[in-house]
Amino acid sequence: MIVAGVDPGTLKTGYGVVSREGSRLRPLCYGVLAPRADLPLAVRLVEIHRGLLDLFSRYRPSAVAVEDIFYHKNARSALVLGHARGVALLAAAELGIPVHAYPPAQVKRALIGSGRSSKAQIQEVLKAILGFDELPPPDASDAIAIAICHANAAGCMRP
């Protein structure tokens, strides 16, 4: 099973693609889509959409996992984040890939056992379980963690 994880943002959208074979997880790719901050929001969304379409077309994941909507102190920030999340959902839907959403606390619990883990803790756990020589950037780490959360949940659902 191949799962693509997406940590949406309009300035930085993290992505990570993992393969699960039995209980073995293997990273296939990860990175950050970072359109120039001085571009209009609509143009940044187009760049993110194109980047995700390219990624999903190249790896053909059986599922895309994204961070679920959560309450944000700043309503405007939450709304803008929702735009980037919508672009990720659209890219997956255009290719017929099912999308699954996970709240941040569930992703952290799935990897570390605590819903209050820091980004640094997530990066260290990913480095250990996936054998990275270097720590992935924080946005990519979050996306990889989301992909692993779904890969593990989907693996548990199989008979």
Image: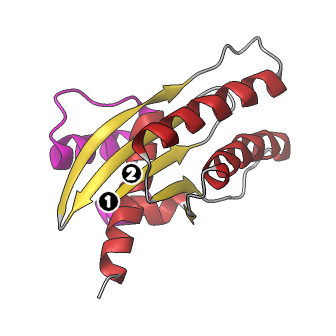
With respect to residue 34, does 67 lie above or below? below
Q: Is residue 114 visible?
A: no
Query: Mark on residue 111?
Result: 1
Cα distance in 3D space between marks 1 and 2: 7 Å
Query: Mark on residue 64?
Result: none
Q: Is residue 110 left or right of residue 100?
A: left
Task: Give the position of the N terminus as an image quadrant.
Answer: bottom left
The scheme the figure's colours follow is secondary structure
Q: Are marks 1 and 2 in contact (CB under 8 Å)?
A: yes
Task: Report which residue position mark 2 lands on.
Answer: 145
Amino acid on which the number 1 mark rests in the picture: Leu
Q: Earlier in the sequence, mark 1 or mark 2?
A: 1
Label 1 sits on a secondary structure element that is helix
Q: Nearer the viewer, mark 1 or mark 2?
A: 2
Q: Is residue 64 left or right of residue 28?
A: right
The x, y position of residue 6, in whole percent, is 52, 45
Label 2 sits on a secondary structure element that is helix
Identify the residue at horizontal 76%, vertical 11% (top origin): 38
On the image, which quarter does residue 116 sit in? Answer: bottom left
The x, y position of residue 15, in whole percent, is 47, 38
Q: Is residue 81 left or right of residue 96?
A: right
Report the magenta residues as a range: 110-138
